[in-house]
Amino acid sequence: MNKRLWSLSLACNVIAWTGCAPEQPVVTPEATPAEVAVPKLAEPETAAPDTTVLVPSPIETQAALAATGVDVNLADLIDPRSPSETARDADRVAIRTGVVLADMILTVKTSEKDTLLAQVQAIQADMAELKGGSDIDATLKGMNEAITADAVTRDELLKEFDELSSAVIPELTFNGRERIVPLIQAGGWLEGIHLVARAIKATGNLDAANNLLKAPSVAEHFLSYVKSAPEGVDAQAQKTTVASLSALHAIASKEAPLTEDDVDTIIAATGAVLSLL
Amino acid sequence: MARQALALAALAVTPSASADVDEEASACLQAKTAEAAGDGWQLRAKRTLHLEAAASQSFQVSLYASTRYRIVGCAPTDRAQLGISVKNADGAPVNTAPAIGREPTVTFSPTQTGLYSIDITAGSSPIQAGFALMFK
């Protein structure tokens, strides 16, 4: 490309970004000449980082596991669970919602209809307890009816559950309680880590452990919420959750490669939280 | 029919400061993610946000090294501009130049599992925009 034209193109790109009329033609270079600087954005005002998209989806984790050579279906490792009658404080209900949501997404294509309905109803009950609002209640009720009537395919349901987990629930406000969405995400993340660690344990693939389980920032992020629990949260459950997340943070922060003992610790730490729910 | 009812119910719970523009961004994202799904991309997250002129919002994301990611943005009007850049935990850019436009797209594969930052930046006008993070 003509160097002058390229310079004009760059100028136009910069101007277009900072406010020139959009109808001005923009010439895109076929390749960036080494001697020309890449256009930079004006220094923007930046708000505090948003963490609502922090954690991977369960399907993403399953795909990453497969990509590292661990041929285990996470859905096969999910333990059947019933909601605890005593876990009624909002923190545990939120974490439990995330766990059930993750399980539901991982198993939707193969689970029995009754199991699927029970999962949707459990989330609906927990959403009501968390004061998620009438819209999410109507959404879950609609899912329940569609499953009952066999009016929706499992592929369609997977997309709906993904949308629910990745776009709908994170936008809810829960009566101004900002900790609820992160704790729901913490539940899904803990379940994912637990299942991945068990899959790695079963296959002995420690390379996968180093690739998938080293996420100290994520553990630290959730730890900050659990540590700052409001009054009414079960003290013993909070203590266990803090200890578990601290253990996960310590292991994920290791510079040395993870060992089988580390994987065992991860399974035990995540299992301790899951057993509270 | 049931599929449509579920999707509509889901849309109904999305809060919005300026409903029309927000719906425009949401509809754009819906179309973009549906199109990408045909190529095997799966949805990780989808957000709409309001940005003042030249303002930026960062989203922290934990990404896997062995996975391909695509971020698509949607600015709702012909005049609106949106920029997307991705940085690693050290602040180094993952995409060599920010994607800029009305519907910018960034596709990349992280070399390391860890924490990354997606920065969404407005041009010279305030915008109600959206982005979707997908993987495959």
Image (tube, rainbow, N blue to C red):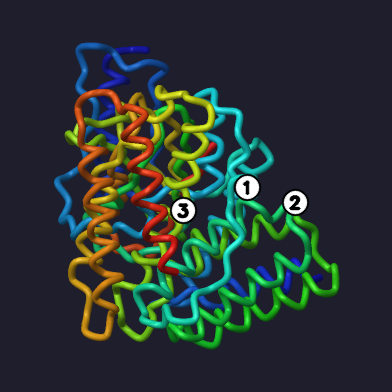
User: Mark 1 Cα within 10 Å, few/some/many (few <14, many 20+)?
Assistant: many
Residue appearing at x 35%, y 43% in the figure: A266
Residue B106 marker: none
Quadrant of the snapshot with the N terminus of chain A: top left
> Are discs 2 and 3 located on one and the same chain?
yes
How far apart in space, not on screen, are marks 2 and 1 (Cα)?
Answer: 9 Å
Q: Which amino acid does label 1 sit on?
A: Ala
- Of residue A9 and residue A266, the one placed in the foreground of this image is A266
One can see residue A191 in this view:
yes
Quadrant of the snapshot with the C terminus of chain A: bottom left
How far apart in space, not on screen, are marks 2 and 3 (Cα)?
Answer: 18 Å
Residue identifier under label 2: A110
Q: Is residue A230 left or right of residue A23?
A: left
Percent position (x, y) of residue A243?
A: 23, 57
Percent position (x, y) of residue A167?
A: 49, 62
Percent position (x, y) of residue B125?
A: 29, 60
Q: Which of the two labelled residues, at mark 1 and mark 3, occupies the earlier sequence position?
A: 1
Residue A75 marker: 1
Q: Which of the two labelled residues, at mark 2 and mark 1, occupies the earlier sequence position?
A: 1
Secondary structure state at the residue bearing disc 2: loop
Percent position (x, y) of residue B78?
A: 46, 55
Residue identifier under label 3: A191
Q: Which amino acid does label 2 sit on?
A: Thr
On screen, residue B127 above or below A206: below
Q: Are marks 2 and 3 in contact (CB under 8 Å)?
A: no
Q: What residue type is labelled 3?
A: Glu
User: Mark 3 Cα within 10 Å, few/some/many (few <14, many 20+)?
Assistant: many
> Are discs 2 and 1 located on one and the same chain?
yes
Residue appearing at x 47%, y 25% in the figure: A204
Q: Is residue A235 left or right of residue B4?
A: left
Chain identifier of the residue bearing label 1 in the image: A
Secondary structure state at the residue bearing disc 3: helix
